[in-house]
């Protein structure tokens, strides 16, 4: 049995330490949390984008209907991307959508921002206002 066709659409999940190494080697970080979450703190890397995968509305979480279009406006399908969120759920879905759309080198960061901070990796947080 040949499983190559299904393997082409599988999502590769890496832990935060592997993700950091990949970002240090030139991968771009795509944070798919809401703008509000991003502003409260995010992975501290030089090559970072924030494009929300879901929006929080009065009716609950709603998928960003323009997510793929927004990513494709700033990234090519050949770009090397690490996708992260708060805990790893949204990034898994976003990575799956990107792979299905033809992005060739996309990795999901397992555990998200919480795992990043939990492993003592550097994060950017807003200055406390006094």
Image (cartoon, rainbow, N blue to C red):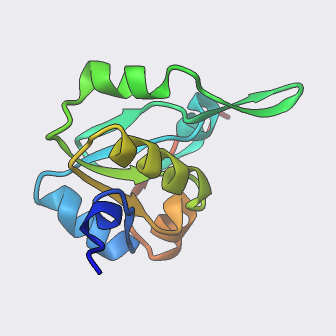
* Residue 87 in view of the camera: yes
> Residue at horizontal 21%, vertical 57%?
23
Task: Judge whether residue 124 can be spotted in this image.
Answer: no
Image quarter of residue 69? top left
* 124 or 18: nearer the viewer: 18
Q: Which residue does the image show at 63% across and 32% down from the upper left?
A: 36
Residue 77 placement (x, y as % from top left): 20, 36
Residue 28 on image: x %, y %: 24, 45
- Which residue extends farthest bottom? 1
**Can you say which quadrant of the picture contains the N terminus?**
bottom left
Vertical position of residue 20 compared to residue 39: above or below: below
Q: Residue furthest front?
A: 1
- Where is residue 126? Give x, y as percent: 53, 39
Q: How many marks?
A: 0
Q: Residue at x 53, y 73 (%)?
A: 118
Seen from the viewer's position, the closer of residues 32 and 107 is: 107
Q: Quadrant of residue 63?
A: top right
Q: Name the quadrant of the C terminus.
A: top right
Vertical comparison of 94 with 89: above or below: above
Quick check: 119 above or below 69? Answer: below
Instruction: State left or right for residue 91 relative to residue 106.
Output: right
For image coordinates 45% across by 76% down, the residue present is 119
Front-most of residues 130 and 58 = 58
Q: What residue occupies the far right of the structure in this picture?
A: 59
């Amino acid at each position: 049995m040949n499983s190559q066709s299904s393997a082409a659409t599988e999502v590769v999940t890496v832990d935060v330490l592997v993700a950091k190494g990949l970002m240090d080697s030139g991968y771009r970080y795509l944070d798919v949390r809401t703008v509000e979450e991003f502003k409260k703190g995010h992975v501290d890397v030089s090559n970072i984008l924030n494009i929300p995968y879901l929006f929080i509305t009065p009716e609950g979480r709603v998928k960003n209907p323009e997510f793929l279009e927004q990513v494709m406006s700033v990234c090519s399908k050949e770009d090397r991307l690490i996708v992260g969120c708060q805990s790893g759920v949204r990034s898994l879905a976003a990575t799956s959508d990107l792979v299905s759309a033809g992005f060739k080198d996309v990795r999901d960061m397992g555990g998200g921002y919480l795992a990043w901070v939990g492993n003592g990796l550097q994060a950017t947080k807003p200055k406390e206002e006094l």
